[in-house]
Amino acid sequence: MSRHLIGVGVLLCVWTLVIPLAGPVTAASDEIRIGMNVALTGAFVSEADLYMKAVRLAEKQLNQAGGINRKKLRLIVQDNQSTNPGALTALNKSLEQDQVLALIGPVKSTQILAMAEAVAAAGVPTMIGGTNPSLTTLGNPWFFRCRVNDLIVAAAMVKYIKEDMKLTKIGLLHSAEAFGTGGADAVTQFAKEQGLTIVAREKYTLGDKDFTAQLLKIKNAGAEVLIPYVLGHDDHAIVNRQYRQLGSPYKYISTPAIAMKDVLNLSREAAEGLLGVVEALPGQSEANSKYLDEYKKEYPGFEPDMLGAWVYDALKVLAAAIQKGGEDRAKIREALLATRGYPGVLGTFSFSKTGEGLHGAYVVVIEHRHPKLLKSVLVDQ
């Protein structure tokens, strides 16, 4: 399947594909420092607990197994305050103050884009969770994505709409930033390739709480199915509830956020029966089942969230690369690119030359606030 550059609203500079001479990093001789850039405060703070529980479990397991090259792994977390400037400030603290060897970056694509130039200049391997396709196509060789990107999600949704739902008219509702715009662009691209029609494309500004006007415009345009590319748990839940309040005027298939615990809890009964494309399902593999068991033992009473597991995978994959490449950033990058068939929680990691780690997705239906598998979809990139 052909790859296209997806617009991100604000065009950032495109880096020349030159690998900086990133050698060993000076740090404490008895430990290996990994930085983490996460929203501990601000609008996205509700997600932080999911990520921190997962990544701290990975850190504990790695150290119990002897660390990395017989050195203790130390994860040093910086708060990005849920903003783009905050993400850049947190990155600078990780590099200059904490002297980290590598990074686990944010999950928000706009924050990753804000960090991109500094990451490229420093030549620091950075595991990312943002799904906007452009993050790995702008020429920055230091980003390694540990989630399924929006091209795969969009292709899977369009394929399912055409082949299984037998529908042809799509309505889009998306947030007006990198995630929403990039996702909507990807759906538009694949719909055109498959002979389907985008009959309405409505956007909204982050912070809006009433989507009724956009949902009605999509209905009046003759949409047979809605695809929401919505940023934020609260926004997604509001869309779900208002869609139901309008009488579910068309079918519905969503992004992986539909299966996030916070979205399901906020949506309540409005989520029942909705379709979505997700990155992973509980118990889908031996590695996934093992993670679920160990998570529940570590955090009794807490149910793991599949999307939160990307940071667990990120730290484990990164540790394996450091084990091979040593404390040299360029060699760590080479080891990541050479990763093939790593059994992660979210799937099997085999990095492409642009840093894409995962290559498949699952279509699910929400039943009793849990995703139930309908179909697995592989997408050739």
Image (tube, rainbow, N blue to C red):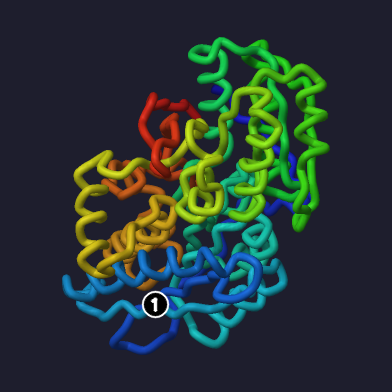
Compared to residue 288, the image places residue 172 above or below, namely above
Decide if residue 40 is in sight here: yes
Q: Amino acid at mark 1?
A: Leu
Seen from the viewer's position, the closer of residues 153 and 101 is 153
Residue 272 in the image: state x and y as whole percent.
48, 36
Count of number-bearing discs:
1
Decide if residue 138 is in sight here: no
Query: In the image, what residue occupies the spot 30% across and 66% down?
Result: 58
Residue 324 located left or right of residue 140: left
Residue 122 in the image: state x and y as whole percent.
58, 70
In the picture, the quarter occupied by the N terminus is top right
Seen from the viewer's position, the closer of residues 201 and 16 is 201
Residue 355 in the image: state x and y as whole percent.
49, 47
Tell me where residue 279 sits by quadrant: top left
Query: In the image, what residue occupies the spot 55% across and 47% down?
Result: 267
Mark 1 lies on a secondary structure that is: strand
Categorize mark 1 by other alpha carbons within 10 Å: few (<14), some (14-19), many (20+).
some
Residue on which disc 1 sits: 75
Tell me where residue 367 sits by quadrant: top left
Query: In the image, what residue occupies the spot 64% across and 28% down?
Result: 248
Compared to residue 110, the image places residue 196 above or below, namely above
Query: In the image, what residue occupies the spot 38% across and 25% down?
Result: 374
